[in-house]
Image (cartoon, rainbow, N blue to C red):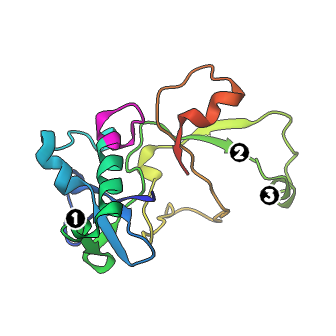
Amino acid sequence: MRLVTFRQKGAKDISALQLGVIWTQEKRILDLSSPLATVEGAVQNHLEWFDLEGKWLTKATLFYEKCLENNLEAENYLLNLEEVELMAPVPRPGKLICIGLNYRDHAIESQMPIPERPIVFSKFSTSVIGDGQSVILPTDSQKADFEAELGVIIGRRAKNVLAENAFDYVLGY
């Protein structure tokens, strides 16, 4: 199940965000927000969708599986990608914890020593953008340093987790 966050084209309010799933190999999205909003009211905070222990992700998964079994059910909630704007997968996450110089080649390329321990830092949640959105650099920026990034979405509270249990807390990448 490939979750996406989207909003109808033209909507500007962050409260207009919806959750969906890329539908098979087609250029369509199965809207999960609309059918589930009628069950117990709308999600109050978009981050509720990403809680592995919460009711909304469970309901979304069950609805998705029901649609896979019955394509007619899915047809009522399918949207063309052209009708929507894909947003950041998790808009305005609670935290962004980053690891710096974690690529040996990038450290060498940057002429920086390879760290003995992870370099941990944070970023503002407003730095997260969606597919096709512009990266806005500060006006006084002299040089941009670009590289591949991998985001890991943690789906439940975690503290002092054993390495062998780590993936029990990962919602996605």
Local crowd size for mark 1, using a 10 Å CA cut-off: few (<14), some (14–19), many (≥20): some
Residue at the image point whose x is 11% and y is 48% from the top: 38
**Amino acid type shown at disc 1:** Glu
The verdict on residue 57 being magenta is yes
Helix, strand or loop status at disc 1: helix
Residue at the image point whose x is 57% and y is 21% from the top: 159
As drawn, is 154 to the left or to the right of 63? right
In the displayed structure, 149 sits above or below 28; it is above
Label at residue 106: 3
In the displayed structure, 144 sits above or below 115; it is below
The verdict on residue 109 being magenta is no
What whole-number distance in Å separates the C-alpha atoms at marks 2 and 1?
46 Å
**Amino acid type shown at disc 3:** His
Label at residue 156: none
Residue assigned mark 2: 100
Q: Which of 62/88 is in front? A: 62
Badge 3 or badge 1: first in the primary sequence: 1
Q: Residue furthest top?
A: 160
Q: Quadrant of residue 88?
A: bottom left
In the displayed structure, 70 sits above or below 167; it is below
Local crowd size for mark 2, using a 10 Å CA cut-off: few (<14), some (14–19), many (≥20): some
Residue 173 place in picture, x, y as percent: 56, 51
Residue assigned mark 1: 73
As drawn, is 76 to the left or to the right of 61? left
Residue bounds of the magenta highlight: 49-58
